[in-house]
Image: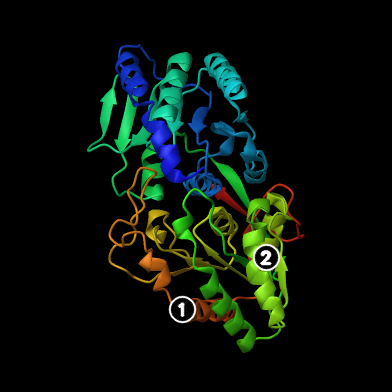
Amino acid sequence: MTLRTLVNIDKLFYPAWWLLWRIGGLVKVSSHDKRTAPVVVVKLMGMGSITRITSILEDRGVSKSQVLFCTFRENEDLGKLLGYPNVHYLDRGVFAFFRSCLNFLLLVKKERPRFVIDFERCSNLVGIFRILLGMAGSCPTAGFDNISSDTRKGGNQVFAVGNLGLEELVSKAAVYFEIQQYTQKYHEVTATPGQVLININASNYLLSRRYPRGKFLEVVLTLHHRNPALQFFFTGTANEREYVEELCSQLRLSGINAHNKAGDWTILELANMLATAAVFITNDSGPLHLAAYLGTPTIAIWGPTHFQQFGYSNPAIHNVHAGTSCSPCFFHPKSKHAISCNGKIDCMKDLSPQQIVTEVLAAVEVQSDVRQVRSFPGMARTPREKVVIYE
C-alpha cells in the first residue's frame, strides 16, 4: 500500500478524530507523575522510526522498563532486539485489529499509566486511539500533527510537527519520562575485513528514497576496481529479492562476489551482520537506523529526507546528499513531497556515485579492527564489555 493511499484512508477518520478531540477535552484526567506505572508509547509503523525513537530516549536516560510500547505484530522481532520488556502487539485484519486494540484499552485501564504518547505523527486514526487510551487510563496524552501551533484540549496535548526533525519531536515528549540511573552495555567486536553490506531498497512507504539501481551498479563496480578483495552482501525483505537480484546478476557477470541476502536474514541476523561489517551503504530506510543504533560505520544516502531530521551527526554516519535546494521535501506522512522537481527526484538522480565511493573508502581506511557496538539481546558477544551508567 502506497504512502498516498494510507494518507487518503486516514483522511476519512478526521471527523471522528475532531469529535473525540472535543469530547476528550471534557473528560477529567489526573496527573500520574508520582506513579511508578509506565508511559504508554504508540508507534505502529516504521522499523526505522521505532529504532531512532528508542536510541533518542536511551541517550536521554530513559529506561525501557518504564515504557509500555504498542506497535504492529510485524515489529515483534524488532521489539525483542531493542530490548523492550513490555510490548503489546496489534494484529492485522479488521476483526483481529479491533480485538487487539480493545485488549490494549483494557490493559491500559488496568495499568493506569502516567502518560500516553503517540509517535505516529499526523494520523487521525492513531490520534483517535491515543485519546481513547487516555480516557481508559484516566491520564494525559500527547501527539504530533500537521497544525500551525501547539494546542491543548483538556488533558490532550498536540504538538505542531512543522519542519521539526524526529530528534526535536522526541525531545518534546521526553519530559514525560522519568530520568533514571540505569546501565547501557556496549560490546567490543572485531570487524570483518572487506565485508560490505548494501541496502539498495526503500520500503513501499516512500519509494522516492531509493538511489537509482543503475548508479548503485556504478558504485560497486568502482569499489571492486579499487579493491578486488571486497565482498558485497545485499540486504532486503523477501518482497525485494527480485529487485535486488537484478543488480546482483549484473555484478556477477562482471566477476564480482555479490550475495543476494534479501529475505534470508532475520532482524537479529541482520543486526549481527551489521555489528561486524566493515561498512554499510544504504538509503534512508529501516536498516539505516538499525546500523546507526548499533554504531556501524554507515554511508547514508539522503534525498527527499535529510540526516538533520533524525539528528545524525555522529562520526559513524557518513552522510551523502546532492545538496539540492528543495531537499528535504518529506518531513512527515502528510508532506507533499517531490513538488519542486515534479516527481523527478533530482536529489537522487544528481547524486554522483563517486561521492559515495569516496565516503566508503574513507570510512574503511580510518576504522580500526575492533569497535564498540551497542549491546542487544541475541548478539554474538565477546568477553570485553563497556558499561555506561546514565543518571
Q: Residue furthest left?
A: 148
Residue 54, given in percent of the width and then of the height, sits at 53, 45
Position of residue 206 relative to residue 42, above or below, is: below
- Residue 171 in sight here: yes
Relative placement, left or right, of 105 versus 381 is left
Residue 25, given in percent of the width and then of the height, sits at 30, 16
Among numbered discs 1 and 2, the one appearing first in the sequence: 2
- Pick whichever, 144 or 284, lies toward us: 284
Residue 207, given in percent of the width and then of the height, sits at 48, 55
The residue under the point 60% across, 57% down is 294
Position of residue 220 relative to residue 268, above or below, is: below
Q: Which residue is mark 2?
A: 245
Instruction: Determine which quarter of the picture holds residue 141.
Output: top left
Label 1 sits on a secondary structure element that is helix
**Tag 1: Cα neighbours inside 10 Å, few (<14), some, or many (≥20)?**
few
- Residue 369 in sight here: no
- Pick whichever, 217 or 316, lies toward us: 217
Position of residue 101 relative to residue 339, above or below, is: above
Residue 201: assigned label: none
* Residue type at numbered disc 1: Gln
The residue under the point 30% across, 49% down is 163
Q: Which residue is mark 1?
A: 355
Residue 97, given in percent of the width and then of the height, sits at 58, 25
Relative placement, left or right, of 173 versus 153 is right
- CB contact under 8 Å: marks 1 and 2: no
* Residue type at numbered disc 2: Glu
Q: CA distance from mark 1 to mark 2?
A: 24 Å
The residue under the point 38% across, 15% down is 29
- Pick whichever, 289 or 54, lies toward us: 289
The residue under the point 48% across, 81% down is 354
Q: Residue furthest bottom?
A: 226
